[in-house]
């Protein structure tokens, strides 16, 4: 299914496929929970955009939907080796986490460490009744026992490869690429 | 407001405002914002300094700065130990460098120090691998106070360029005046000072204007009046006749308070306030009095400093270690 662009950059999803994937996840959530009260929380930076996209579809049929964003920098388990990831951004959780039903959104699920950090941070706001996880791309190679409830596309990858999700809002196009080792962004 | 280009600092210690780059000042102020947002959560603690030790070494009395650093460190999950100097071996005659060698053996990651002699934090910084934060040394510097003042003002004026601040009081003995005026000047503010002739240094940096009368200074239309504490404990000579006299000439009296309110001027003070000396009681309830915000922001700014120094130390650690022995 992969449309080869060059040897070291492969497109995994184009704009249409991305749109389709977002809608499919939105309908999965609606099928499962209907108009139940829920909160979508996006993990900075592209998880926020992904959550917004799904929110737009789900909120047409569900009026009890809240939205929040999470910056997990302070909760990372690699504080000794943060590099450019060190910039702390704001988290905005404008609803009461205590007893709430939360779906976490991130663009790429890889080692699972980001999701672990996000869960820890959410629990510092209160005790949610349930947390689920939606990812656009699952690239495997988990280092923690974490499994998504909603997956856009599973892509088998190796550690030396990179997955780049690009959104119009942040990167001027809608696409997902798999980059080989040493490939230009 | 310009955004900092860097996401981390490249220094081990925070000793004064002068050695910070403008980028680093912006970075600290930007980083303090998400930390302040934590204060509204039910759990205000975050994990990035887990397992790190902060040692507080206060050779001069301080309640608020020490407590502020302690809360900041604890909210970052660091462990805090207070080295109470009055009860320690310092009174038994141990030299500062011997004390530092002792602290070095205790493997603390940060040393927060206040001392009555200018330059002691720097001396300590050169002799330890720990990150040293100056919490006030003599008449020299109090950088975290300057940063929290800048942060507090930026909450009100997103762009400080061209805004005017009048610093009133004992300029001569004040490390707060020195650090805060430099920091605000570097962020583009116009800074003026006013105080008793005996309490103004004989040589002032050229960017500072000096007023000789409070009324005249208020006609300059400052956006902020920054009142310094009258530091009675520091004045060995008689710089002015009496507290009443000081209040009359250099304090916010009833008439001046009316003037400040009608002009909508903000009021700041590093604390603790001597009521009836620097200002009358009513000022404390004035809606544009920022004293309580300064205290709250102090914690956020100190969290930002600890967090950023922690990242920068880790970057530098390998080449620092051998230099010590």
Image: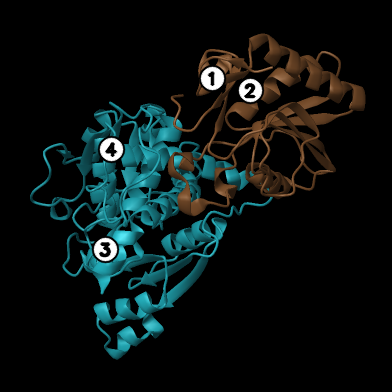
Local secondary structure at mark 3: strand
Q: Chain of mark 4?
A: B
The Cα atoms of the two marked residues, 3 and 1, are separated by 46 Å
Q: Are marks 2 and 1 on the same chain?
A: yes
How packed mark 4 is, by other alpha carbons closer than 10 Å (few <14, some 14-19, many 20 or more), is some
Residue B278 visible, this angle: no
Which dot, 3 or 2, sits closer to the camera?
2
Q: Are marks 3 and 1 on the same chain?
A: no
**Disc sitting over residue A49 in the figure:** 2
Which residue occupies 28% across, 42% down? Answer: B183
The Cα atoms of the two marked residues, 3 and 4, are separated by 22 Å
- The chain painted brown is A
**Disc sitting over residue A170 in the figure:** 1
**Residue toward you, B45 or A15:** A15
The Cα atoms of the two marked residues, 3 and 2, are separated by 48 Å
Q: Are marks 3 and 2 on the same chain?
A: no
A91 over B253 or under it: above or below = above
Which residue occupies 40% across, 46% down? Answer: B148
Read off the residue under disc 4: B22
Read off the residue under disc 3: B137
2 and 1 marks in contact (CB < 8 Å): yes
Q: Chain of mark 2?
A: A
Measuring from the top left, give residue A142's x and y in whole percent. 68, 44
How packed mark 1 is, by other alpha carbons closer than 10 Å (few <14, some 14-19, many 20 or more), is few
Which residue occupies 13% across, 52% down? Answer: B201
Which comes before the other along the chain, label 3 or label 4? 4
**Residue toward you, A111 or B121:** A111
């Amino acid at each position: 299914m992969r449309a080869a662009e060059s040897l070291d950059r492969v497109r995994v999803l184009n704009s249409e496929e991305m749109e389709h994937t977002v809608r499919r996840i939105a309908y999965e959530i609606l099928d499962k929970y209907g108009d139940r009260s829920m909160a979508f929380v996006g993990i900075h930076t592209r998880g926020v955009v992904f959550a917004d996209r799904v929110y737009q579809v789900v909120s047409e049929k569900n009026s009890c939907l809240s939205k929040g964003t999470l910056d997990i920098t302070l909760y990372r388990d690699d504080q000794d080796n943060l590099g450019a990831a060190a910039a702390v951004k704001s988290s905005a959780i404008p609803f009461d986490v205590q007893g709430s039903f939360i779906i976490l959104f991130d663009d790429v699920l890889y080692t699972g460490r980001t999701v672990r950090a996000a869960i820890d941070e959410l629990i510092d706001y209160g005790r949610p009744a349930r947390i689920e996880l939606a990812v656009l791309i699952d690239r495997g190679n988990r280092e923690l026992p974490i499994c998504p409830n909603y997956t856009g596309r599973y892509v088998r990858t190796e550690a030396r490869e990179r997955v780049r999700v690009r959104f119009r809002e942040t990167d001027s196009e809608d696409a997902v690429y798999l980059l080989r080792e040493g490939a230009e962004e | 407001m310009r955004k900092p280009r860097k996401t981390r600092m490249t220094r081990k210690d925070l000793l004064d405002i002068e050695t910070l780059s403008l980028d680093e000042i912006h970075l600290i102020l930007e980083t303090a914002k998400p930390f302040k947002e934590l204060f509204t959560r039910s759990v205000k603690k975050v994990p990035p300094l887990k397992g790190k030790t902060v040692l507080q070494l206060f050779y001069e009395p301080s309640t608020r700065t020490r407590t502020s650093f302690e809360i900041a460190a604890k909210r970052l999950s660091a462990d805090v130990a207070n080295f109470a100097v009055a009860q320690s071996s310092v009174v038994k005659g141990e030299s500062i460098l011997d004390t530092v060698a002792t602290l070095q053996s205790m493997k603390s990651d940060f040393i927060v120090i206040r001392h009555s002699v200018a330059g002691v934090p720097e001396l300590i910084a050169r002799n330890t691998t720990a990150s040293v934060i100056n919490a006030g040394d003599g008449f020299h510097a109090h950088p975290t106070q300057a940063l929290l003042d800048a942060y507090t003002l930026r909450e009100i004026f997103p762009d400080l360029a061209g805004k005017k601040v009048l610093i009133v009081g004992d300029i001569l003995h004040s490390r707060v005046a020195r650090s805060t005026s430099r920091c605000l000047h570097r962020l583009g503010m116009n800074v003026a000072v006013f105080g008793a002739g005996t309490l103004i240094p004989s040589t002032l940096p050229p960017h500072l204007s000096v007023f000789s009368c409070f009324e005249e200074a208020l006609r300059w239309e400052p956006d902020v009046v920054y009142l310094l504490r009258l530091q009675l404990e520091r004045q060995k000579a008689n710089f002015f006749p009496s507290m009443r006299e000081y209040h009359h000439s250099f304090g916010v009296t009833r008439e001046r308070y009316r003037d400040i309110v009608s002009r909508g001027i903000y009021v700041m003070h590093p604390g603790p306030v001597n009521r009836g000396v620097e200002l009358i009681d009513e000022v404390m309830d004035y809606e544009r009095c920022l004293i309580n915000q300064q205290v709250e922001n102090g914690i956020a700014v100190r969290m930002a400093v600890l967090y950023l120094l922690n990242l920068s130390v880790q970057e530098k650690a390998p080449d620092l270690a051998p230099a010590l022995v």
